[in-house]
Amino acid sequence: MAEEWCLLNKDTLVIKPLKKSHLALRMFVLAAVMICGVYICSVCLKQIGSQSMPRFVKFELTEEPCSSVGVPPSEVSYLHYPKPTTYIREECACTPVRKFAILSMQRSGSGWFETLLNSHVNISSNGEIFSIKERRNNMSSIIRTLDKVYNLDWYSSASKNECTAAVGFKWMLNQGLMANHDEIVKYFNERGVYAILLFRRNLLRRLVSQLANDHDRRTKQLNGKHRAHVHSEYEANVLAKYKPTLNATELMSSLKTANECVTNALDYFNSTRHIVLYYEDLILNHTKLVDVLKFLGVPQRLMVSRHVKIHKKPLSKQVENWEDVYNAIKGTEASMGLQDRLEPNSVVGWADKGASFIMILASDSALPPCNQGSQRRQRGRRLSKMVAASGTNSWAKEMVIRRRIANIFNKREDDFPSLKDYNDYLEEVEDMTSNLVEGIDVAAIEAKIAKYQEENAEQIINARARKAEELAAALRASQNPSSVDPADAGPGPSSQGVGVGSQGQYAPAAVPGGLMQPRPTGMAPQPVPVGAPADPLQGYAAEDEETMKLRAERGARAGGWTIELSKRRAIEEAFSGIWV
């Protein structure tokens, strides 16, 4: 046992060094494990930290470009899709916008023209934005203002609720336009701006209007306020009372300077995309506004203006020293200003597709002072010439057409041998009127009207004169009833103070004291007309049953009743009881 223990001790003693080496190895392994554990823990902590943070997925949205289908290739560069900073234009983002500028001179009809454009739901014209000097001090301020307007960030009364398809403003030639024309032309060409050049051919009338406007700016004739444009006949008549005195010695130089300014403007902006308009052409030719809408690429719509023309009289009645002015420019190129064009009192617009609905009646006062005799010979033809457009609705259009036709086809029942012929005449006139209102066969009807006027010129004039005499007699009778001719009042006053004429028409009769008796009213029996017609049928043949039936149906239909209404009502009443 002792030997075994010794041997065990010997083995144990031999193994002890080996145990020390295992301890070092274990320490090394432990250290490696600890390092690996720390590393793994750090990695896990990083992963846990990244998982706790929200993840953001970035999506890059690419806007699909707006298509320009149906637009000619030459027009694509003039289509703009502005992105204003003052509001969001989401619903109109793909509505292209065209930029324009109205280049004109003061008192050339630019204000009236701009109101017409602004009446369009898709056009916004922001007025004279460069009337303030700070906006036109230098080219940088001009470009800054232009960019703000064309980016739809310019807020004014011209801003629209609908999608704007054309945006612009009015720019006078003396508001920095001519002084910086090179840079402005370059800007227009680079940014695709349309130029609308609006001028006035009659420079003498423009000068008269300008002097009258300067006078009102000083005197403020309308309730202490200056009005460059008016919206009523009363205001226009007040401003038109002033007659400016022109400097006859410097008149030619003034007209020449204005003409040179217009010529230079046309030359400077000839390289831009432009259209040239004249105020007189817009007044006399309604298709010019249609050309403007096509030029701007907007649909045709009803265009209205409330402006009323101020100076409507001839120049001889609007200039204080007309004789001196006439002698100063007679025989020169400026004498073209003496040829007054027919201009309406107020042109308020025209409807879709360029239909024109106004009559401008020429009178002797609107004729030029020179060659007045030759112009008078054509007065009858001018009396019913339709030259412009007016009326804001179909009712106004129909009223104007009916007045015109009634002024031409003015025959009465006395001009026909029978009532049948007179009614046929009225029906023919009504058919022509209805077709003109509806726009059916307008050219053929106008030719028929012109032929009728030429063949019946004497009768038309006589009928108008007779109507004028009757109106004058009625006016005299209303102003002085005691001076009425007894023969005109009928056989004599009755017991009720009612005069009975030979045609069975009743009119108040004059009584002592100058008062008119009232027309009888109520259910009292009326006097029987004196005399009976010689022909009870009034020209209608008794055997013509088809004609009588047709006229009866037309009469009922004119009153809003047809035989089908009574039939339908009877059927409805009969069957309504079944469903009960």
Image (tube, grey):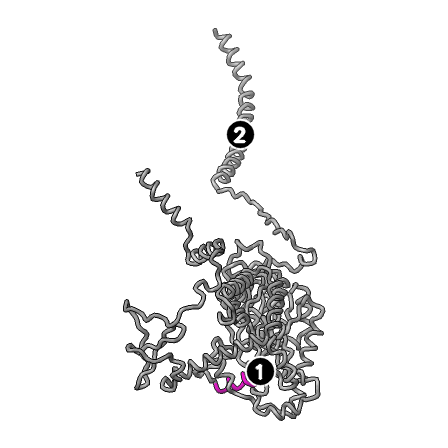
Q: Quick one: SS at disc 2? A: helix
- Quick check: can you spot residue 153? no
Are there few (<14), some (14-19), or many (20+) residues within 10 Å of tag 2? few
Q: Magenta stretch: residue 291 in it?
A: no
What's the residue type where badge 1 is placed?
Answer: Asp
- Residue at 68%, 85% (x, y): give it: 334
Which of 359 and 467 lies nearest the eye of the viewer? 467
Instruction: Tell me which label, 2 or 1, sits earlier in the chain.
Output: 2
Residue 94 visible in rendering? yes
**Image height check: is 393 above or below 470?**
above
Q: Position of residue 230 (x, y in %)?
A: 49, 77
Q: CA distance from mark 2 to mark 1?
A: 120 Å
Q: Specify the segment rendered in magenta.
A: 207-219
Tell me the element at label 1: helix
Closer to the camera in the image, 336 or 135? 336
As drawn, the label of residue 209 is none
